[in-house]
Image (cartoon, coloured by chain):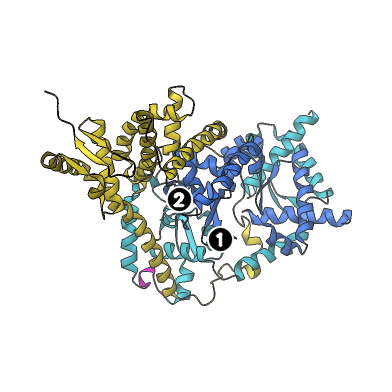
Chain colours: A cyan, B yellow, C blue
């Protein structure tokens, strides 16, 4: 293999694993990069050594059978725990509280609708609530690429409630939002993404 | 206001952009004289806005009123404008020039814009589980009660409600335009002349805008004539006698 | 700074941004890495150049104001599209393009200034851009009742840019409006509200 191509393929492999996040089959990677599995093995070897030997790099390659995954080096696991603790110990921000109340009163609800009601993109905040276990999500049975969000069972239990409908004045606020939903129904099908 | 309506609204350029478009269509430079030349076209465009995007009409009228000043100056060379009016015209000219120069920047964006992102990032804590202490995954905030959630959604929805109804009210008033025009012509039938000041005295902003629009329409259709005898004096609106 | 420490800090920065995923405040990063903000700026510079100049690397560093995010290089967008299959097509309407270009070349910018330049109330369009995640806003540190609007990291992703300043002829058009802003500052100070 030429030096130039090999470089580009290492970079391609890095960006692929970065986006995907989870362990990925070698067969699938070879397909996506449009190379043979032997070539891929060669590139993986080079990449693995680069990551390991370079003190500038904070990442490493995990191999599990026929799968590989990009992950942080063990040296930085403490750092990861620190971020999580920081994020979790903080009380909810006003924006998070707003998002949570919409999901609590109107879940299951698509992200685009939360965005519309709040007037601002809420992807990161929903993800944050998800990580904290306050909110759950599952794919919309009607629309395969869209997730629906709802308040988690754990959180309801924490409040001492058996179901969402026991939230104060649930019916009133739920109806109000349903009205807004109808008014905006033309648009929600347009710009939705799976998040 | 529904989202579908917002989407429609997005199809309309602002008044400065529109005015620039009209000037450039005729391959003119930005001068007061040339502004006077496109005034009629701008007024025609107003009717589109009035029908399809009434909630931005008021802003188009601000520009229209300045254009009318430019036009009257072009028609009546002896007309002396107030300092404020002169400044308004200069400001419009200035903004148009900036806008014209800035247009290249807008075209850069238009050409480089990709409908699908070229660059991808990772989700927040995409590999969260490996870092969660004690493998727990439920971290409720302290001191949060169900009533807090209720208070938050109550405030949020009332803000949204305000946003929706403000627009609705405005639309209703504008829709009465044709009725207003008939009413106004009725009054001219008996009075022959009407003072603009009297007509718009102690009326709401939306009503003054409506009156102004009525007048613009009627001038355009050659049904009325507007006169101001001396500077600062009352504007008189007169019905044009149809030629038989 | 010693060479060894600097290496480790670059690696730590990389793993931190990798774990966090979302854009991160410099202040927060400096706290987590237990270094001063100036030291962090230095490390960011080194990291940014490394990523850009090394053809082995598939990642780049995006920056808006005091926030940075790790992302894939635009060269690999086809790979990204193959993995992330959902529809994320965003089109720009005339009013959105008009408004977005003002924000892109002149953000952070107050709404009153956008309104003034366009000659029309831009509240709805800006709200729509916020909902679509192409624009972000935050309270003006000098005038807490006024919001400043700027482009978002998602905006950069649609152009494959690492920062706002990489927009073509950025300086020229930024100066153009800056000059105008100064000249008209007395006029716009009148009608401003937090919206």
User: x and y percent of residue A57 in the render?
Assistant: 78, 50
For residue A185, above or below residue A128: above
Q: Chain of mark 2?
A: C
Report the side of B141 relative to C49 (left or right).
left
Query: Quick check: do tags 1 and 2 share a chain?
Result: yes
Counting residues from the start of the chain, the first of labels 1 and 2 encountered is 2
Secondary structure under tag 1 reads loop
For the question of whether residue C16 can be seen, the reply is: yes
Using the image, tell me which numbered label, if any, was put on residue C127: 2
The residue nearer to you, when weighing A70 against B122, is: B122
User: x and y percent of residue C137 in the render?
Assistant: 54, 54
Which residue in the protein does label 1 denote? C143
Residue density around tag 2, few if under 14, some if 14–19, many if 20 or more, within 10 Å: many
User: x and y percent of residue C5 in the render?
Assistant: 85, 57
Tell me where residue B191 sits by quadrant.
top left
User: x and y percent of residue C185 in the render?
Assistant: 55, 50
Residues in magenta, as a range = A161-167
Report the side of A41 relative to B131 (left or right).
right
Using the image, tell me which numbered label, if any, was put on residue B243: none
Q: Chain of mark 1?
A: C
Task: Verify CB contact (< 8 Å) between mark 1 and mark 2.
Answer: no
Residue density around tag 1, few if under 14, some if 14–19, many if 20 or more, within 10 Å: few
Q: Residue at x 48, y 45 (%)?
A: C116
Q: Nearer the viewer, mark 1 or mark 2?
A: 1
Secondary structure under tag 2 reads helix
């Amino acid at each position: 293999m030429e030096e130039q191509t090999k470089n580009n393929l290492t970079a391609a492999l890095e960006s692929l694993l970065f986006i995907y996040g989870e362990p990925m089959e070698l067969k699938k990677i070879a397909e996506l990069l449009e190379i043979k599995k032997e070539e891929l093995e060669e590139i993986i070897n080079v990449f693995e050594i680069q990551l390991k030997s370079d003190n500038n790099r904070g990442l490493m390659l995990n191999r599990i059978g026929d799968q590989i995954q990009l992950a942080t080096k063990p040296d930085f696991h403490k750092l990861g725990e620190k971020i999580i603790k920081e994020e979790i110990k903080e009380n909810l921000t006003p924006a998070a509280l707003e998002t949570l109340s919409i999901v609590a009163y109107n879940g299951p609800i698509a992200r685009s609708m939360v965005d519309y009601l709040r007037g601002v993109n809420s992807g990161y905040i929903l993800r944050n609530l998800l990580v904290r276990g306050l909110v759950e999500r599952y794919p919309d049975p009607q629309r395969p690429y869209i997730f629906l969000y709802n308040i988690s069972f754990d959180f309801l239990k924490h409040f001492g409630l058996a179901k969402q409908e026991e939230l104060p004045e649930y019916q009133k606020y739920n109806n109000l939002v349903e009205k807004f939903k109808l008014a905006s129904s033309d648009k929600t099908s347009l710009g939705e993404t799976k998040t | 206001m529904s989202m579908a309506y917002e989407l429609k609204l997005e199809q309309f350029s602002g008044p400065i952009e529109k005015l620039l478009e009209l000037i450039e269509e005729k391959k003119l430079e930005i001068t007061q004289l040339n502004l006077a030349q496109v005034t009629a076209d701008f007024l025609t465009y107003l009717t589109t806005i009035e029908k399809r995007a009434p909630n931005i009409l008021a802003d188009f009228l601000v520009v229209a009123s300045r254009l009318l000043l430019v036009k009257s100056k072009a028609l009546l060379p002896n007309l002396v404008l107030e300092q404020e009016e002169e400044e308004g015209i200069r400001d419009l000219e200035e903004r148009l020039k900036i806008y014209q120069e800035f247009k290249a920047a807008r075209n850069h964006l238009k050409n480089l814009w990709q409908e699908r992102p070229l660059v991808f990032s990772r989700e927040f804590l995409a590999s969260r589980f490996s870092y969660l202490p004690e493998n727990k995954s439920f971290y409720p905030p302290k001191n949060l009660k169900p009533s807090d959630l209720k208070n938050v959604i109550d405030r949020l929805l009332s803000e949204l409600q305000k946003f929706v109804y403000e627009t609705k009210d405005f639309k209703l008033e504008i829709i009465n335009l044709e009725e207003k025009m008939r009413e106004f012509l009725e009054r001219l039938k008996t009075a022959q002349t009407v003072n603009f000041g009297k007509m718009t005295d102690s009326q709401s902003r939306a009503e003054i805008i409506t009156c102004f629009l009525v007048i613009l329409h009627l001038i355009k259709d050659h049904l009325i004539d507007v006169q101001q005898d001396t500077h600062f004096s009352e504007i008189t609106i007169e019905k044009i006698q149809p030629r038989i």
